Image (cartoon, rainbow, N blue to C red):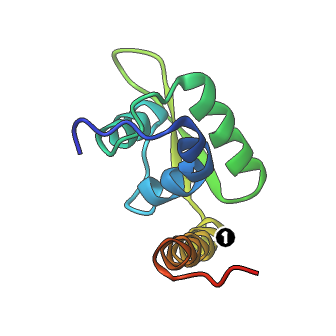
């Protein structure tokens, strides 16, 4: 998806769902999550946005972390999606699809004027 640069408002609205989606494929650390998101159009994502979001997701019980200790450097947090996080991803994905369909319907249907 090179060349895509989502509107910042859309990025904010979709970021939680996108992070949960990345983690649905397995555990990952913050930098790797950011790289995957950038590859999919979230090119303006900054650590000052991602890491507080990961903390909120952890506080909500949607993700958990463990420390991975590296021999050649500092340890890093590995984030994992919880069962509650998977449920939230399913719920938010369904809501996003419903909203997308509603926007398509509004745009394509002929509206009667009052």
Q: Quarter of the image containing the N terminus?
A: top left
**Residue occupying the far top of the picture:** 73
For residue 71, side relative to residue 9 (left or right): left
Q: On the image, which quarter does residue 106 sit in?
A: bottom right
Name which residue lies at 42% across and 54% down: 22
| Residue 51 to residue 94: above or below | above
Q: Quarter of the image containing the C terminus?
A: bottom right
Name which residue lies at 62% across and 76% down: 91
**Residue occupying the far left of the picture:** 2
User: Residue 15: horizontal and vertical position, in percent?
Assistant: 55, 47
* Of 81 and 9, the residue lying toward us: 9
User: Residue 112: horizontal and vertical position, in percent?
Assistant: 65, 84
* Of 48 and 12, the residue lying toward us: 12
Name which residue lies at 46% across and 59% down: 21
Q: Residues within 10 Å of mark 1 (few under 14, many from 20)?
A: few
Q: Which residue is mark 1?
A: 84
Name which residue lies at 43% across and 52% down: 27
**Residue occupying the far front of the picture:** 114
For residue 59, side relative to residue 67 (left or right): right
Q: Element under label 1?
A: helix
For residue 56, side relative to residue 103 (left or right): right
| Residue 63 to residue 12: above or below | below
Q: On the image, which quarter does residue 111 sit in?
A: bottom right
For residue 58, side relative to residue 75 (left or right): right
* Of 81 and 104, the residue lying toward us: 104
User: Residue 82: horizontal and vertical position, in percent?
Assistant: 60, 64
User: Residue 9: horizontal and vertical position, in percent?
Assistant: 60, 41
Q: How many marks?
A: 1
| Residue 101 to residue 68: above or below | below
């Amino acid at each position: 998806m090179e060349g895509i640069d989502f509107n910042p408002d859309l990025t904010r609205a979709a970021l939680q769902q996108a992070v949960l989606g990345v983690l649905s494929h397995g555990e990952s650390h913050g930098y790797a999550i950011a790289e995957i998101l950038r590859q999919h159009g979230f090119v303006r994502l900054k650590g000052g946005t991602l890491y507080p979001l990961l903390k909120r997701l952890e506080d909500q019980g949607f993700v958990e972390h463990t420390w991975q200790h590296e021999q050649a450097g500092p340890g890093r947090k590995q984030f994992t999606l919880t069962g509650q996080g998977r449920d939230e991803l399913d719920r938010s994905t369904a809501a996003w699809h419903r909203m997308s369909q509603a926007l398509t319907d509004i745009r394509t249907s002929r509206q009667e004027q009052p």
